[in-house]
């Protein structure tokens, strides 16, 4: 392997919060088992069946994680930034990320297999603790995003009803002023 690439990979691994406190020898082991990738904006992660259970770590950049909805449109689920992980973390979770993980700006990430990650966590239990913290952080971000969207939507709909004279609302009460129209609005 080219020395410059090895040095760059070591730099990225060293600056990943998941691997904070890992010794120089342990870091070399990480460099040996991970594969580094660079993506340009709008470039997707290419699915490789050999690595269906891969775990990806974002070193720098920004990715969008999207899923196709029933209408065939992509719905963004989460933005992934440095320190985030995604992929098959769990038993037999062969996940295909080829259609739904796209770089939004120049991005550097590393890939390892689920088995390699499990071996690291057995050898270095503090990594398991950090991984749990990252997982909780991601769940909190998702929950905040979903609740925030719901509140915004409810406020927007209620405001529209108020503007059309269908409801009158205060902090503690909502008065329905036109049940016939509201019944049709709710049913449609």
Image: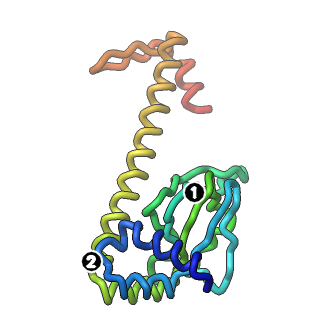
Give the structural element (helix, strand or loop) at label 1.
Answer: strand
| Position of residue 142 measured from the top left corner of the image (x, y, whole percent) | 43, 52
Who is closer to the viewer here, 41 or 95?
41
Sooner in the amino-acid sequence: mark 1 or mark 2: 1
> Label 1: which residue?
63
Give me the residue at 50% from left, 14% from top. Answer: 166
Q: Residues within 10 Å of mark 1 (few under 14, many from 20)?
A: many
Q: Nearer the viewer, residue 34 or 10?
A: 10
Neighbour tally class for label 2: few under 14, some 14-19, many 20 plus, Cα within 10 Å: some
Q: Is residue 138 left or right of residue 103?
A: left
Q: Is residue 95 left or right of residue 165?
A: right
Compute the Cα span from label 1 to label 2. Answer: 26 Å
Q: In front here: 6 or 146?
A: 6
Residue 6 higher or lower than 41, as above or below: below
Residue 36 visible at all: yes
* Residue appearing at x 55%, y 18% in the figure: 180
């Amino acid at each position: 392997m080219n020395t410059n690439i090895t040095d760059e990979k070591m730099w990225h691994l060293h600056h990943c919060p998941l691997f904070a406190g890992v010794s120089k020898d342990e870091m070399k082991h990480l460099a040996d088992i991970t594969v580094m990738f660079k993506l340009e904006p709008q470039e997707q992660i290419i699915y490789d069946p050999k690595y269906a259970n891969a775990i990806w770590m974002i070193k720098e950049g920004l990715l969008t994680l999207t899923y196709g909805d029933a209408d065939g449109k992509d719905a963004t689920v989460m933005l992934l930034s440095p320190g985030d992980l995604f992929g098959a973390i769990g038993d037999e979770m062969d996940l295909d990320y080829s259609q739904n993980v796209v770089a939004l700006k120049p991005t550097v990430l590393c890939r390892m297999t689920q088995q390699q990650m499990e071996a690291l966590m057995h050898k270095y239990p503090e990594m398991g603790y950090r991984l749990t913290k990252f997982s909780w952080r991601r769940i909190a971000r998702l929950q905040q995003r979903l609740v925030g969207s719901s509140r915004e939507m409810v406020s927007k709909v209620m405001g529209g009803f108020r503007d059309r004279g269908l409801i009158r609302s205060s902090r503690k009460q909502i008065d329905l002023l036109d049940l016939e129209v509201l019944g049709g609005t709710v049913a449609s």
